[in-house]
Amino acid sequence: MTARLLPGGPVADAVLADVETRVAAFTAAHGRRPGLGTILVGDDSASAGYIRMKMAKAEELGFASPHLHLPQDATQEDVLGAVRSFNSDDAVDAVLIQHPTPPQIDFDAALLALDPDKDVDGLHPVNMGRLALGMPGPVPCTPAGIEALLAHHDVPVSGRNVVILGRGTTLGRPLALLLSQKRPTANAAVTVVHTGVPDWPEYTRRADVVIAAVGVPGILRPEHLSPGVTVVGGGVRYEGKRLLPDVDESCAEVAGAITPRIGGVGPTTIALLFRNAVELAEARAA
Ligand SMILES: NC(=O)c1ccc[n+]([C@@H]2O[C@H](COP(=O)([O-])OP(=O)(O)OC[C@H]3O[C@@H](n4cnc5c(N)ncnc54)[C@H](OP(=O)(O)O)[C@@H]3O)[C@@H](O)[C@H]2O)c1
């Protein structure tokens, strides 16, 4: 079997086209652009590159993109000060704190200091609570991107057996909350497996959809799958500039549908960041 590919690019394009329209409507209605603030701490070149890319995309979509860059030796108080200044700035609707931060910085404390109604990544505990309770709020971008990707490619999830490998806080755990919600593009029977379930292949072999959210290259192999299953690769590890996915490429010989190794979940994550940003702006203005 050769699997149907599920690229993220067309999903991202559709989401970003909608974002651009909403940003223009917001700007026309409120006489100012919605603001996506970014905070970068330190000199990590990969992080600086990600921020540059996100700021350029923000400007292209019509956002204002104020940026605070703190030095490598910034203190916790410096970072909290930057977060508070964006919290109190009415022109800033959404804030991204780039991860990772230097070792002297407690990232979680910085996240806790952020106004949850400006939390573009949806990772603040208040927003995780809203997700668990099914209340409106920003949803973590990668899980939201995976739901959008499956919906866009008409992979049914409702009523199906979805197994998520990994229970991490940025991906597996919020994705399980999201896909078990009572909505047409969710509504799944979700099982989460992890290191505490050594016989996890017993679960993935019975799944209709398997989502890898681990960060261990090649952990998911064809013998863990049943023929025709849909496979989504969310977990990756970087070695230098090389991107090593959780999903071994030979899985494509067994799966019915699969995300490509490059250009799968990644583009949807970025697109959902901007959708969160415009939705936060709309919610603040309402
Ligand atoms: N594509 C994107 O845009 C994007 C965005 C965000 C994250 N990611 C990637 O998604 C992955 C997960 O992110 P995260 O922050 O949620 O990670 P995390 O907090 O490190 O969680 C990893 C999870 O994988 C499980 N795990 C590790 N080794 C395992 C093994 N041998 N067998 C079974 N389970 C195993 C862990 O189990 P325990 O809980 O038992 O330790 C844990 O639940 C990472 O690779 C990250 O880079 C990708």
Image (cartoon, rainbow, N blue to C red):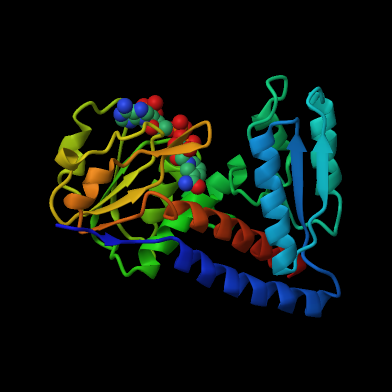
**Viewer can see residue 131:** no
Is 50 rendered above or below residue 199? below
Q: Quadrant of the C terminus?
A: bottom right
Relative vertical location of residue 49 with respect to residue 273 in this rendering, above or below: above
Is residue 25 at least partly visible in the picture?
yes
Give percent across and percent down for residue 222: 18, 42
Query: Is residue 255 left or right of 91 when viewed as pictured?
Result: left
Q: Is residue 15 left or right of residue 222?
A: right
Q: Measuring from the top left, give residue 243's x and y in whole percent.
A: 45, 39
Q: Position of residue 21 (x, y in %)?
A: 65, 77
Of 90 and 232, nearer the camera is 232
Residue at the outermost front position: 241
Q: How many marks?
A: 0
| Up/down of 26 relative to 276, above or below | below
- Measuring 72% from the left and 34% from the top, which residue is drawn there? 110
Tell whether 21 sits left or right of 202. Answer: right
Residue 69: quarter of image: top right
The residue nearer to you, when weighing 151 against 87, is: 151
Residue lying at 51% horizontally and 56% vertically, measured from the top left: 267
Q: x, y percentage for residue 103?
A: 68, 20
- The residue that appears at 59% across and 49% down in the rendered structure is 122
Q: Residue at x 20, y 53 (%)?
A: 255
**Quadrant of the frame with the N terminus:** bottom left
Could you tell whether 97 is left or right of 4 in the image? right
Where ligand 1 lies, by image quadrant? top left
The quarter holding residue 248 reads: top left
